[in-house]
Image (cartoon, grey):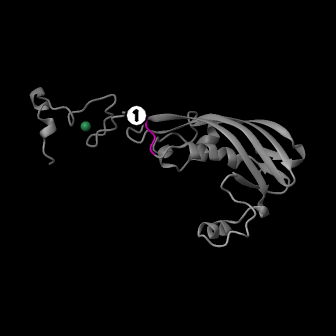
């Protein structure tokens, strides 16, 4: 058990209010392996990876632990067209429930439910609840914080709506440069460009 984690809350400390800071090293670690993050070619320890702050109120009701509050931060991924860094802001309201691991439906049960088989057995429907497990008398908020970053990564991030991307031939950034593949040397040919047949 990661007792040293800054994101651990002990049941005996509830109710409590916590302000949790996520530094860039964590963000970089959590997003490693995601294509739009790896495409940046950022160093292993990237001070620009992102950051976040969660302000949470936590209280227990029976064996359930409720966490509510806000999460604000940002993360940096690559533009899906030009591969330049794009900063994605995060501003979320959080309301989640932590349950003892054995009370959560197992993955198998969830799959059965998804497959339309008898859902009676499960006590919890996950539709309106964001559920996380906890073990023993320790609630680890890390999966919740990690999820804020992972879910914030867009499918195809753009540095700007009209990003011109990279030249497919020479790889130059068309937002900041022009290349000969694009611009005909003879300006008179430019008028014919739209008529050019595919080669
Ligand atoms: Zn771009
Ligand atoms: Zn080019």
Magenta residues?
Answer: 156-161
* 96 to the left or right of 159: right
Q: Residue at x 14, y 31 (%)?
A: 190
Say which residue label 1 marks: 161
Inspect the magenta stretch and tell me whether residue 5 lies in it.
no
> Taking the image as drawn, is residue 22 in sight?
no
SS of the residue at dot 1? Answer: loop
* 113 to the left or right of 4: left
Question: How crowded is the residue under tag 1: few (<14 C-alpha within 10 Å), some, or many (20+)?
Answer: few
In this view, the residue in front, 25 or 124, is 124
Q: Main secondary structure of the magenta part?
A: loop
* 9 to the left or right of 44: right
Give the quadrant of residue 107: bottom right
Q: Residue at x 60, y 66 (%)?
A: 114
> Taking the image as drawn, is residue 196 in sight?
yes
Q: Position of residue 23 (x, y in %)?
A: 66, 36
Q: Residue at x 81, y 36 (%)?
A: 17
């Amino acid at each position: 058990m990661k007792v040293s984690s800054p994101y651990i809350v002990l049941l005996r400390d509830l109710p409590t209010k916590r302000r949790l800071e996520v530094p860039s090293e964590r963000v970089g670690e959590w997003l490693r392996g995601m294509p739009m993050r790896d495409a940046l070619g950022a160093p292993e320890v990237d001070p620009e990876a992102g950051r976040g702050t969660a302000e949470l109120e936590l209280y227990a009701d029976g064996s359930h632990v409720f966490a509510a509050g806000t999460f604000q931060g940002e993360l940096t991924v690559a533009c899906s067209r030009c591969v330049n860094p794009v900063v994605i802001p995060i501003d979320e309201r959080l309301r989640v429930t932590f349950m003892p691991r054995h009370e959560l439906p197992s993955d198998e049960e969830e799959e059965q439910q998804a497959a339309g088989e008898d859902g009676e057995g499960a006590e919890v429907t996950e539709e309106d609840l964001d559920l996380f497990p906890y073990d023993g008398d320790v609630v680890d908020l890390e999966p919740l914080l990690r999820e804020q970053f992972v879910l914030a990564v867009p499918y195809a991030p753009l540095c700007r709506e009209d990003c011109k991307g990279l030249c497919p031939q020479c790889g130059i950034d068309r937002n900041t440069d022009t290349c000969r593949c694009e611009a005909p040397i003879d300006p008179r040919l430019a008028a014919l460009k739209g008529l050019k047949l595919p080669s």
